[in-house]
């Protein structure tokens, strides 16, 4: 195996690909054009969710504030448990199924924007992007799927997810622990999972199989992947985070390549036993 496990990305079919690995303190490895900005697709949801958590700690909004369908709250929307379907149609009762919903994240952003008295992208810029130094990240598209960023920026963000400074460790722990943990649902690209654990905007690996992370990733691993061929995972038990950005849409190539890369990263760069 290469000293830098990320070099195996050169065999991926993507025209351009970049990746990096970090602990809570420092980057351990990088490969490819890490300063190139890529569309994030649904990895955007991590940035949006974190911004909502900042708003909660600032008491701009509350997790139990009503939002979305009758009986739903910000907590339900973040956890994909509001009953909204992907495009905003009512697909189930609140809290009964895990239904992945872009529309729910649009509502989240609208609620925060109204409470803060400014556009969501402006609030996110002031509350999160600027304090973390994410100068190359753009959040001016859909709060569900419209952001773009570089590997360098997302590694900074990943370090925040390992060593939070803008929110309390307790808040981060709640956000990355399964919410409504027994709900079943479909993990996009990987089929029905029962249970299908999710935190407050962060997908939690749990015992899901198949999955886009590796077999070496702990059940506590959390993160997200995007249809544009992107992912970010954080494994708190290994004190490692991995980011990969490409310009090739998710497909069978990614379902095979991403878990292999994740396992190679954990085998090669893991510091904690």
Image (spheres, rainbow, N blue to C red):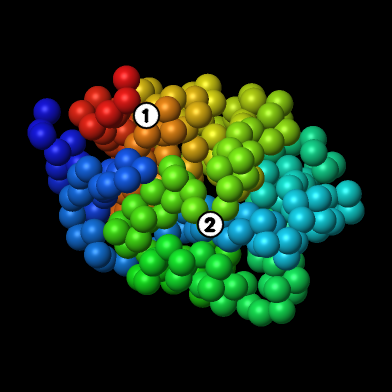
The crowding category of the residue bearing disc 1, from other C-alpha atoms within 10 Å (few below 14, some 14 to 19, many at least 20), is some
Between discs 1 and 2, the one toward the N terminus: 2
Answer whether residue 78 is visible to the viewer in this image: yes
User: Between tags 1 and 2, which lies in front?
Assistant: 2
Kindly identify the residue that appears in the image at 32 percent across and 41 percent down. Answer: 23
Kindly identify the residue that appears in the image at 50 percent across and 29 percent down. Answer: 220
The crowding category of the residue bearing disc 2, from other C-alpha atoms within 10 Å (few below 14, some 14 to 19, many at least 20), is some
Residue 228: x, y in percent?
40, 56
Residue 184: x, y in percent?
68, 29
- 209 w.r.t. 148: above or below: above
The quarter of the displayed image where residue 239 is located: top left
Relative horizontal placement of residue 240, taking residue 79 as reference (left or right): left
Residue 97: x, y in percent?
74, 36
Q: CB of mark 1 within 8 Å of CB of mark 2?
A: no
Relative horizontal placement of residue 86, taking residue 121 as reference (left or right): right
- 127 w.r.t. 213: above or below: below
Judged from the image, the secondary structure of the residue bearing numbered disc 2 is loop
Residue 129: x, y in percent?
46, 67
Q: Nearer the viewer, residue 269 or 231?
A: 269
Mark 2, residue position: 166
Mark 1, residue position: 238
């Amino acid at each position: 195996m290469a000293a830098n496990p990320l070099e195996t990305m050169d065999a991926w079919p993507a025209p351009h690909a970049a990746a990096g690995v970090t602990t809570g303190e420092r980057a351990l490895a990088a490969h490819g054009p890490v300063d190139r900005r890529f569309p994030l697709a649904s990895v955007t949801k991590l940035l949006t969710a974190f911004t909502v958590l900042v708003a909660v700690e600032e008491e701009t909004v509350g997790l139990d504030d009503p939002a979305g369908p009758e009986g739903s709250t910000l907590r339900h929307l973040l956890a994909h448990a509001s009953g909204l379907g992907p495009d905003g149609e009512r697909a189930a009762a609140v809290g009964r199924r895990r239904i992945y919903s872009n529309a729910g994240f649009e509502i989240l952003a609208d609620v925060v924007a109204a409470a803060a008295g400014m556009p969501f992208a402006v609030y996110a810029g002031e509350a999160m992007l600027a304090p973390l130094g994410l100068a190359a990240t753009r959040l001016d598209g859909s709060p569900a799927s419209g952001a773009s960023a570089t590997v360098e920026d997302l590694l900074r963000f990943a370090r925040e997810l390992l060593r939070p400074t803008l929110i309390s460790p307790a808040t981060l722990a709640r956000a990355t622990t399964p919410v409504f943990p027994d709900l079943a649902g479909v993990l996009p690209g990987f089929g029905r999972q029962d249970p299908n654990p999710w935190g407050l905007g962060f997908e939690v690996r749990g015992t899901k199989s198949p999955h886009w992370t590796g077999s070496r990733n702990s059940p506590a691993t959390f993160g997200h992947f995007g249809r544009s061929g992107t992912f970010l995972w954080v494994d708190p038990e290994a004190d490692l985070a991995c980011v990969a950005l490409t310009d090739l849409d998710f497909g069978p190539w990614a379902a095979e390549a991403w878990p292999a890369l994740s396992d190679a990263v954990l085998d090669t760069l893991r510091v904690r036993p």
